[in-house]
Image: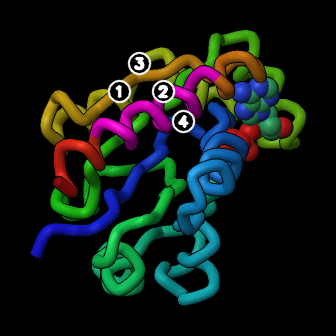
């Protein structure tokens, strides 16, 4: 059965602005905001912390089980730093946010991340790891790479989604 509303995934390297953008977007379009990182903790979708990488060891199957009932009806803006283990059918639009090197560095420093974690994230952003994963996992035409350096970028990204949504409704609900 076709969804009445699409789901939108907002992904990108930590610090690129996923949460800020996804929360703001979900309010503007009146969609449900789904923070996968929070759900991982609330539902114990992990096997503890990886001390070397200072992050959770994700239980990807469990994450998908928790998300399935939320996403099956559509109407969600999903915020997560990886995208390759979600079923392709969940998303009609995948946005990969990017920040310039200096901007991202300052954001990560202000989070008090370790030097190692900052370096890893900077390298991942420069190598466009998340964008490549998104392009490998979803149809090319639904993946969009967007700058997320300042408030103007965010506003323009939200406007683009609103326009996209308008078109999606015209093409899918008539
Ligand atoms: P993420 O969810 O990708 O880890 P975030 O939304 O928590 O990133 O943002 C990290 C920091 O950067 C936070 O202090 C808010 C700021 N920020 C995010 N997007 C921004 C934007 N478009 N313009 C200015 N600041 C932004």
> Is the C-beta separation of discs 2 and 1 under 8 Å?
yes
Q: Nearer the viewer, mark 2 or mark 1?
A: 2
Image quarter for ligand 1: top right
Q: Nearer the viewer, mark 2 or mark 4?
A: 2
Image quarter of the N terminus: bottom left
Residue 15 seen anywhere in this rendered image of the structure: yes
Residue tagged by mark 3?
Answer: 127
Residue tagged by mark 2?
Answer: 160
CA–CA distance in space, label 3 to label 1: 16 Å
Q: Nearer the viewer, mark 3 or mark 1?
A: 1
Image spot of residue 87 (x, y percent): 20, 63
Is 156 above or below relative to 109? Answer: above
* Disc on the earlier residue, 2 or 4: 4
* Disc on the earlier residue, 2 or 1: 1
Residue 13, numbered circle? 4
Q: Range of the magenta residues?
A: 156-167
- At horizontal 25% and vertical 43% (from top left) the residue drawn is 170
Residue tagged by mark 1?
Answer: 144
> Is the C-beta separation of discs 2 and 4 under 8 Å?
no
**Mark 3 nearby-residue class (10 Å; few <14, some 14–19, many ≥20):** few
Local SS, label 2? helix
* Disc on the earlier residue, 3 or 1: 3
> Is the C-beta separation of discs 3 and 1 under 8 Å?
no
CA–CA distance in space, label 4 to label 3: 11 Å
Question: Which residue is at the front of the view, 160 or 40?
Answer: 160
Image spot of residue 125 (x, y percent): 51, 23
Question: Which residue is at the front of the view, 7 or 44?
Answer: 7
- Asked if residue 157 is among those painted magenta in the image, a careful observer would answer yes
């Amino acid at each position: 059965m076709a969804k009445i509303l699409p789901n939108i995934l907002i992904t990108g390297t930590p610090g690129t602005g996923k949460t800020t953008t996804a929360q703001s977007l979900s309010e503007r379009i009146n969609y449900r905001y789904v923070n996968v990182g929070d759900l991982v903790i609330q539902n114990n979708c992990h096997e503890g912390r990886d001390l070397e990488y200072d992050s959770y060891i994700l239980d990807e199957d469990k994450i998908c089980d928790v998300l399935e009932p939320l996403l099956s009806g559509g109407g969600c803006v999903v915020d997560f730093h990886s995208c390759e283990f979600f079923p392709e059918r969940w998303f009609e639009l995948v946005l990969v946010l990017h920040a310039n090197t200096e901007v991202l560095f300052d954001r990560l420093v202000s989070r008090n991340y370790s030097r190692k974690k900052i370096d890893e994230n900077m390298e991942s952003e420069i190598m466009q790891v998340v964008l490549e994963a998104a392009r490998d996992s979803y149809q090319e035409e639904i993946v969009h790479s967007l700058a997320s350096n300042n408030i103007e970028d965010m506003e323009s990204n939200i406007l683009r989604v609103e326009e996209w949504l308008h078109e999606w409704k015209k093409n899918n609900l008539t």
